[in-house]
Amino acid sequence: MRARDRILDAAAEIMRAEGIARATTKEIARVAGCSEALLYKNFADKSQLFVAVLQERAPGLGEVLAGLPDRAGSATVRQNLTDVVRGGLDFYLATFPMAAGLFSDRALLDAHRARLAELGVGPEQVNTWVAEYLRREQSLGRVTPDADADSAASLLLGACLQRAFFARMSGQDAVDAGAEADRLVAVLCNGLVRV
């Protein structure tokens, strides 16, 4: 296995268990079986490593969203949004423990925000992709023309984040993503999708 993959695996393991704030590059390198120098050859800093863990080692929200706008007109709106919710629930449930620690350390949070800006990524992108998908569906006449795509994306993804938070707070490591997705999408689609 390549050093980069070992580092990502170790970082994901430690960040899931301890959160990003407590995951040191020294400990990640130790678990990966490499030096910190090798870690820094592969990743400029811990924020870049965290983004890579989210993109490459977290459950598939990125995979679902990557081509979502291009799925407009395919399958049904309900099915496409159900896929988004399932991916969102899995992603937020897996990553909530990693990211929550960011908010306990102001300097780390500020550094992470700055790094995300440099990398051109951030959590708001998920909403952007879903909203763009909904706008494309509007142009095809499959979503009501007066629907606010940005608000619908926020409601859908915000519900995923909230469900993951509630599950983690109650000690659950999983949720019934299929049932949750069906319920959430049904409520949203009742006011959004043309029959």
Image (tube, helix red, strand yellow):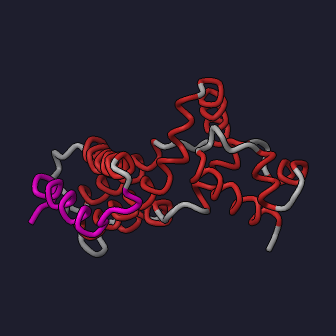
Please state the horizontal and vertical placement of residue 167, each as a whole percent of the image. 34, 52
Q: Nearest the camera: 112 or 121?
A: 112
* Residue displayed at 32% across by 60% down: 85
Residue 189 highlighted magenta (yes or no):
yes
* Residue displayed at 17% across by 50% down: 145
In magenta, the rendered stretch is: 172-195
* Visible residue check, residue 131: no
Quadrant of residue 143 within the rendered picture = bottom left
Q: Is residue 28 above or below residue 113?
A: below
Q: Is residue 114 rendered to the left or right of residue 62?
A: right
* Residue displayed at 76% across by 59% down: 7
Please state the horizontal and vertical placement of residue 150, each as a whole percent of the image. 31, 42
* Residue displayed at 28% across by 69% down: 178
Q: Nearest the camera: 176 or 160?
A: 176
Q: Is residue 57 above or below residue 111?
A: below
For the C terminus, give its image quadrant.
bottom left
* Visible residue check, residue 165: yes
